[in-house]
Image (tube, grey):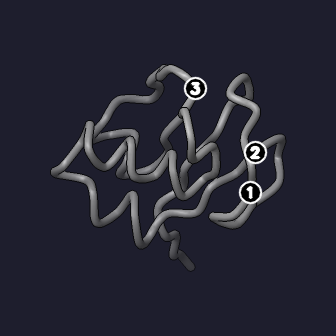
């Protein structure tokens, strides 16, 4: 799932097959960047990933069945 500007550009949700070989957030980021090259910078460098309501690092392993949410940088006042 995508939120903020990512959701506006890519749509709210996309479903992909489990990643073979590199089943981490980093691997998922690269798969998504290949699918959406116009958003690759935001997907690879600036967004945060969340699994089960917890912000996770790029080394987080994925089983392939969970929902992953990506949030762009946020600011506000």
Is residue 5 depicted above or below 48 in this figure? above
Is residue 62 depicted above or below 12 in this figure? below
Precedes in sequence: disc 3 or disc 1: 3
Marks 2 and 3, how far apart in space?
A: 15 Å
Q: Which mark is residue 51?
A: 2
Q: Which residue is labeled 1 in the image? A: 60
| Towards the viewer: 22 or 53 | 22
* Residue at image coords 82%, 54%: 54
Q: Where is residue 42 in the image (x, y as percent from the top left)?
A: 34, 63
Marks 1 and 2, how far apart in space?
A: 9 Å
* Residue at image coords 26%, 37%: 35
Q: Residues within 10 Å of mark 2 (few under 14, many from 20)?
A: some
Q: Are marks 1 and 2 in contact (CB under 8 Å)?
A: yes
Q: Which residue lies furthest to the left in this view?
A: 38
Precedes in sequence: disc 2 or disc 3: 3
Q: Is 50 displayed left or right of 22 in the figure?
A: right
């Amino acid at each position: 799932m995508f939120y903020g500007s990512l959701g506006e550009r890519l749509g709210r949700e996309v479903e992909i097959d489990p990643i073979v070989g590199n089943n981490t957030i980093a691997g998922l980021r690269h798969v998504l960047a290949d699918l959406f090259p116009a958003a690759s910078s935001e997907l690879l460098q600036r967004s945060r990933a969340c699994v089960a309501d917890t912000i996770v690092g790029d080394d987080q392993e994925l089983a392939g069945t969970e929902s992953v949410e990506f949030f762009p940088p946020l600011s506000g006042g």
